[in-house]
Every structure is written in C-alpha cells, then in structure tokens.
Image (cartoon, grey):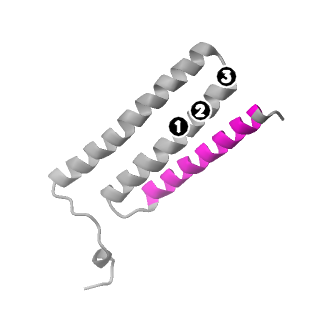
Amino acid sequence: MTPLEWGIVVLALVGAFFGGVASVGIVRLPDVYTRTHAASKSDTLGAVLAIGAAALAIQTDLATIKAVFLLVFMFLTNPTAAHAVARAAQDQGIEPWTAGDEEGES
C-alpha cells in the first residue's frame, strides 16, 4: 500500500471511531445538553475525517473542491445547530442533569 492509501484508511477508521463515539454518547448520556455536546463535537469530527478520506480517495479536482465546501459547511452548521438545540431546551425550561438527579437519592 502507498502512503496515500494508508492515509485514507487511517482517516476513514478514525472518522468511523468518532462517529461511533457520537452514537454511544447520544444513546448513553442523560440529558439534552450532554447529548447535544456529544453529537456536535464527535459527530462533526468523525464526519470531517470521513469526508477527508473520501476526498483523498476520489482525487478528482471537482470532487475534492466539493468535499472542501462540504467540510466548511459542516464546520459552520453543526456547532450552530447544536447551539440552537441547547438554546431551545433552555428556553423550554429544561434543567441540566446534575449528580443529585440520580435515581435512588432523596
């Protein structure tokens, strides 16, 4: 394998790892604020790495330019959407989870 192919494989695997971390975070975390954090941070990084791997694998000028535009779009919209979700939850009066909210505690 060439170094370029190794780079594509590494980017794709690390992107898949962060996508999996985001999925686990969305399922396992206790409230909307922590789930939003997991979705915005890990999912953005995983998607960016996977799109970067795809851009390197395709190596067509037009496809690479489209991938770069998609990366910029994701860097701008994912954190903005996460902020909007958190703001909407705050406006609805949803309180953040705390350690005292565990079941069994009085």
- Which residue in the protein does label 3 denote? 58
The residue positioned farthest toward the top in the image shown: 62
| For marks 1 and 3 on the same chain, the one whose residue lies earlier in the sequence | 1
- Which residue in the protein does label 2 denote? 52
Q: Secondary structure at mark 2?
A: helix
Residue 2: x %, y % from top left: 81, 33
Picture quadrant of residue 30: bottom left
Residue type indicated by callout 2: Gly
**Is 37 drawn above or below residue 29 in the view shown?**
above
Asked whether the residues under the numbered discs 2 and 1 touch, taking CB atoms below 8 Å apart as contact, a structural biologist would say yes
**Is 61 drawn above or below residue 77 in the view shown?**
above
Image quadrant where one finds the N terminus: top right
Is 4 or 36 nearer to us in this picture? 4
The residue positioned farthest toward the front in the image shown: 3
- Which residue in the protein does label 1 denote? 48
Residue 59: x %, y % from top left: 67, 20
Category of crowding for the residue at label 1, using alpha-carbon neighbours closer than 10 angstroms: few (below 14), some (14–19), many (at least 20): many
